[in-house]
Amino acid sequence: GKDRLESFYGRTDIVIADRDFVECHAEDIYLPAKEADVAFLIVGDPVCATTHSDIMIRAREEGVTVEVVHNASAMGAVGCCGLQLYNFGQTVSIPYFDENWRPTSFYPKIKYNRLGGMHTLCLLDIKVKEPDFEAMKRGRTVFLPPRFMSVNESSEQLIEAEEVRKGGAYLPDKTLCVGLARLGQPDQCIMAGTLGEVKNAD
């Protein structure tokens, strides 16, 4: 947490910038850099997210010198499964479905990649500091526990997307896919199989 970071860096002015802060108050990150050194630490590589690229562009427009230190990212780590990075097409994000929102905007990109003989990297949704709307109705600000989409959940949603779109982008019981979880951790897991098989894997 914050205390550990401040102890490690020998500072007392570290700000924990959650997603809302980064997306809605980015100027609070780069404008102070006009007067002093500011470091923005993130998980992954900073140039792999449009939000971070936007902050760099806006900072430079304000005359702030930006230095980038690249980091490990799922965009490169996916190569550990044996698929060649050169053969990947467009990357897609798979968002959590709920009862009112079941977007399949990722589907055409997967189909495009498949028609071109390319792999698709599917980045799975995470929910951190997700508001509890029932609590908000009662005037309380409460956040739900963090959620990290599993390969199983994403497989179910990909199967549903094919059933809804019916475009033949992939065949849930035949098309080979690779599921990767906890990359770089001692308990990382890599499994190949059809969506139906991966959906039921542990």
Image (tube, grey):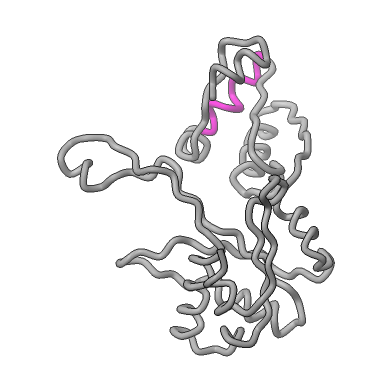
| Rendered image quadrant of residue 89 | bottom right
User: Vertically, is 68 above or below 164?
Assistant: above
The magenta stretch spans residue 31: yes
Q: Is residue 6 above or below residue 181?
A: above
Nearest the viewer among 164 and 57 is 164
Give 20 or 84, whichever is nearer the viewer: 84
For the point 65% across and 19% down, which residue is it?
Answer: 34
Figure disc tally: 0
Measured as percent of width and height from the top left, residue 47 is found at 71, 45
Judge from the rendering whether residue 70 lies leftward or rightward of residue 181; answer left or right. Answer: right
Q: In which quarter of the view is residue 193 placed?
A: bottom right
Q: Position of residue 171 (x, y in %)?
A: 59, 87
Residue toward you, 197 or 28:
197
The residue lying at 62 percent from left, 13 percent from top is 7
- Residue at (57, 62) in percent of width and height: 93
Q: Quadrant of residue 36?
A: top right
Q: Quadrant of the N terminus?
A: top right
Q: Is residue 126 above or below residue 62?
A: below
Magenta stretch secondary structure, dominant: helix
| Left or right of 143, for residue 60 | right
The location of residue 95, given as percent across then percent down, is 48, 61
Q: Quadrant of the C terminus?
A: bottom right
User: Over which residues does the magenta segment extend?
Assistant: 26-36
Q: Is residue 21 magenta?
A: no
Left or right of 66, for residue 102:
left
